[in-house]
Amino acid sequence: MSVSVYHFSPTGSTKQIALAFGRALDQNASFVDLAAPGIHGGSRPIPDPDENETSLALFAVPVFAGRVPAPAIEAIERLDGKGVVAASAVVYGNRDFDDALIELNDVLTRQGFAIIASGAFVARHSMLPSVAAKRPDASDLEDVSKFARLVAEKAAAKDALSTPDVPGNRPYKEASGAAWVPTVSDDCILCGICAAQCPVEAIPRSAPNTTEAGCFQCMRCVAVCPKDARSLPAPVAAMISEKLGPVAGVRKPNQMWV
Ligand SMILES: Cc1cc2nc3c(=O)[nH]c(=O)nc-3n(C[C@H](O)[C@H](O)[C@H](O)COP(=O)(O)O)c2cc1C
Ligand code: SF4
Ligand code: SF4
C-alpha cells in the first residue's frame, strides 16, 4: 500500500501522530508538511496524492478553538483528491475537538477525497504544555498504529468504503477572533529562527522581535525560540490556565470512527 501523509503541525505533536500512522503501514510513506514556511504564501507547491489503486492518504491537523486552523484549510483546498481513499485525524490538547473533525472531513470531501475513517487523538496542549504534558506517549502511539491497521483493513475491503459519522455540528463553532500575538522579551538575540519557521511569515526577518497581523497564534515561534524569549501574553496565559483547569488532571481517551 502506498501511503501519503499530509500534516499541519506547528509544534510537532500532530506530526508525531502522522509519522506513527504512516510508518505503521508503509516504510516508504511520503510525508507532506502543510505548515512549512512558503506553503501558505503559495511559493511552495503541494504534491497531490498518487491516484493508483492502492493509495491511501492521511490528513492530520491540530484543533485550534474547536476548529481546523485556517491556514491548514487553505492548504488542503489547493489539493485535488481525485477520489483517493483517505483517513482524517485531529489532534487536540485534552479539552475538546468540538467541530474540527467534521470540518476536516467536509473540506476533504469537497476536494474529492473518499474519507473512510477518522480519529481524534490527544497531545500536549501547545498553549499550556503542562496539560497532557507527555502525550502522545507509548500508549497513544499504539492507538495510532491500531487506527492505521483498521484503516488499511477497511481500504482493502473495497466494496464497503463508507464515510463514518463523526461528532460535530454544522454550522461550525465561530472561529476564534482572538487578536493577541506572542510577547517578545529582551532576551531576544535577533537570531531569526522564529522568522524562518513561522508558517505564515508573520515575523519580519528584519525585526524578528516583532509580530505582524496574520499571526494565527500557532505557538511555533514560542516553541522554537532558543532563548525562550517568546511567550503567551500574561492575560492570555491566565485565561487559558483557568479554562483548562478542569481537564488538566483528566486523561482523555483517543477515539476512532472506522
Ligand atoms: C490557538 C490554539 C488553540 C487551541 N485550541 C484547542 C482546543 O480548542 N481544544 C483543545 O483540546 N486543544 C486546543 N489547542 C491545543 C492543540 O490542539 C494541541 O496542543 C495540538 O497537539 C497542537 O498540535 P501541534 O503540536 O501539531 O502544533 C489549541 C492550541 C492553540 C495553539
Ligand atoms: S527565535 Fe527567539 S531569540 Fe531568535 S529572533 Fe526569534 S524571538 Fe528572538
Ligand atoms: S508569529 Fe504567530 S503564526 Fe507565526 S509562528 Fe508565532 S504564533 Fe505562529
Image: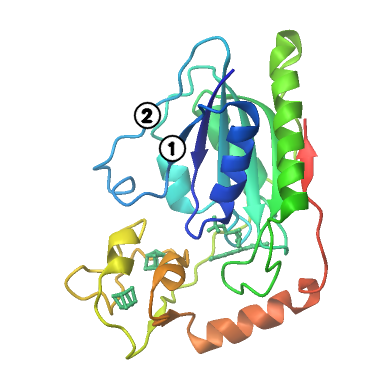
Query: Residue 145's quadrant in the figure?
Result: top right
Circle 2: element type: loop
Q: Tell me the residue at 71%/75% (across/down).
A: 244
Rendering coords of residue 38 (x, y %):
28, 48
Question: Which quadrant contains ligand 1?
Answer: bottom right
Residue 36, placed above or below residue 23: below
Residue 216 placement, left or right of 54: left
Number of residues whose C-alpha sits closer than 10 Å to that of mark 1, classed few (under 14), some (14–19) or many (20 or more): some
Residue 202, placed above or below residue 164: below
Return the residue nearer the eye: 225 or 45: 225
Ligand 1 within 8 A of label 2's CB?
no
Rendering coords of residue 15 (x, y %):
54, 48
The N terminus: image quadrant: top right
Is residue 171 at all visible to an observer of this figure?
no
Return the residue nearer the eye: 93 or 129: 129
Residue 74 placement, left or right of 253: left
Identity of the amino acid at label 2? Answer: Pro
Number of residues whose C-alpha sits closer than 10 Å to that of mark 2, classed few (under 14), some (14–19) or many (20 or more): few
Mark sitting on residue 58? none
Residue found farthest to the left: 206
Mark sitting on residue 47? 2
Identity of the amino acid at label 1? Answer: Val
Q: Which residue is mark 1?
A: 32
Q: Tell me the residue at 52%/34% (across/down).
A: 5
Residue 118, placed above or below residue 220: above
Query: Residue 243's quadrant in the figure?
Result: bottom right
